[in-house]
Image (cartoon, rainbow, N blue to C red):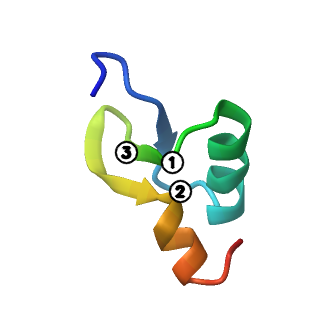
Amino acid sequence: MTTNPKTISANTLAIKALEQMQKKGISQLLAMDNDTYIGVIHLHNLINEGIL
């Protein structure tokens, strides 16, 4: 856990989320709508959906 987690806009495409995770060496991003937490995008979810 961190006090400053990596985030992504809720309307960002899944492939862009994957690119960010790979670039930063992380396995999850918090999805945000403006300043509101929407959910978590996890690398395993992208794999399960065939994005990777």
Q: Residue furthest top?
A: 3
- Distance from label 2 to label 3 (Cα)? 8 Å
Q: Which amino acid does label 2 sit on?
A: Asn
* Mark closer to the chain start, 1 or 3: 1
> Label 2 crowding class (10 Å Cα cut-off): few <14, some 14-19, many 20+?
few
Residue 29 position within the rendered picture, expressed as x and y whole percent measured from the top left: 45, 44
Q: Disc number at residue 18? A: none
> Which one is closest to the eye, mark 1 or mark 3?
1
Q: Disc number at residue 27? A: 1
Q: Disc number at residue 33? A: 3
Residue 35 position within the rendered picture, expressed as x and y whole percent measured from the top left: 31, 32
Q: Disc number at residue 11? A: 2
- The secondary element bearing badge 1 is classed as loop
Q: Nearer the viewer, residue 8 or 50?
A: 50
Task: Name the residue located 67 percent from the left edge and 41 percent from the top edge.
Answer: 20
Contact, mark 1 vs mark 3 (Cβ under 8 Å) = no
Vertical order, 25 against 31 (above or below): above
Vertical order, 18 against 30 (above or below): below
* Mark closer to the chain start, 2 or 3: 2
Q: Find residue 49 and report its image quarter.
A: bottom right
Q: Which of 48 and 37 is in front in this view?
A: 48
